Amino acid sequence: MADIGSTRVFGHARRSVKIIGLRRRPLADLYHRLVTGSWTRLVTIYALVFFGTQALFGLAHLALAAEWPPGASVIPALLAAADAPPAPAPPLSGRWLAGGAVSAVETFVRWLLAVIGAGILLAKYSRIPARVIFSRVAVVGPHAGGRALLFRMANERTSHILDAKVSVMLVRNERGEDGEVVRRAHDLPLARDGSALFSHAWTAVHPVTRESPLFGETEASLAAEDAELVVTLSGYDEGLTRVIHARRTYLPEELRWDVRFRDIVKVLPGGAQAVDYRRFHEVVAIEPPGERTPRRAAR
């Protein structure tokens, strides 16, 4: 079986990838573009379609109400029909039938715009993103007698995330056996990649052992390889009653070496614990063993 932990992938951390041979058809996937796009794009496109159809049907009604003598110009005839009230067309006449047909089509188009607009708005409102905070940086430093990669996550909502799962990939450029530079992804196993109940803060730890793809890497080597760490998290939000997903990418310059995260959990005077998210992104230098401040012995 092929090694699925080392998979060839495409994409680069700092520059976009030029797509060749794949035809983009925005109108064929307009629903996806409107639902996943910005609210500004959605409102702008819907306003253009709405007012555009209103203008077209208004011109159609004016054209039916206007008098068209031989040699008459279009604009003066339409202006004259707009200024003077149109004379009622005789029943079953050509103008009467055409006016009824235009009114029927206008009613159908307005109904269609309302239904499609409501569907897109409902789909867009139902796309509730995960509110998971990732630390601005990841750290690589001493941990539990060795070295490890660490990053923080926090649930910003008050509801719990059940059966949360997190995974990390190291994506970098490598030179294959044929000398070709390819983009490969390596899974970074975590000391704990799941949590039955994710409610507050969670520090993920990847031990940097000799078997780790990060072993021997530095900030300069990762930058030369155009590397990036891709973090994905998923779980069941009991408040939304749905599965949520979140992701974060760390570039080489967003890694801090030989530091640790500042402690955010403290004990209040009454004995209760508190989580200080003001220090969530802060890191501190690791003191050498000989320079650590000795702690007072417990009595």
Image (cartoon, grey):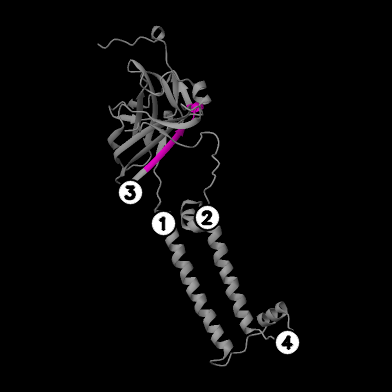
Q: Earlier in the sequence, mark 1 or mark 4?
A: 4
What amino acid is found at the position of numbered circle 3 in the picture? Leu
> Residue at horizontal 47%, vertical 29%?
172
Q: Earlier in the sequence, mark 2 or mark 3?
A: 2
Mark number, residue 26: 2
What amino acid is found at the position of numbered circle 2 in the picture? Pro
Pointer 2 local density, CA inside 10 Å: few below 14, some 14–19, many at least 20: few
Pointer 3 local density, CA inside 10 Å: few below 14, some 14–19, many at least 20: few
Q: Residue furthest left?
A: 299
Above or below, 235 relative to 83:
above
> Residue at horizontal 36%, vertical 42%?
157
Q: CA distance from mark 3 to mark 4?
A: 67 Å
Mark number, residue 240: 3
What amino acid is found at the position of numbered circle 4 in the picture? Pro
> Residue at horizontal 62%, vertical 89%?
87
Mark number, residue 70: 4
**Which residue range is magenta in the image?**
245-254
- Secondary structure type for disc 3: loop
Q: How many marks?
A: 4
Q: CA distance from mark 1 to mark 3?
A: 15 Å
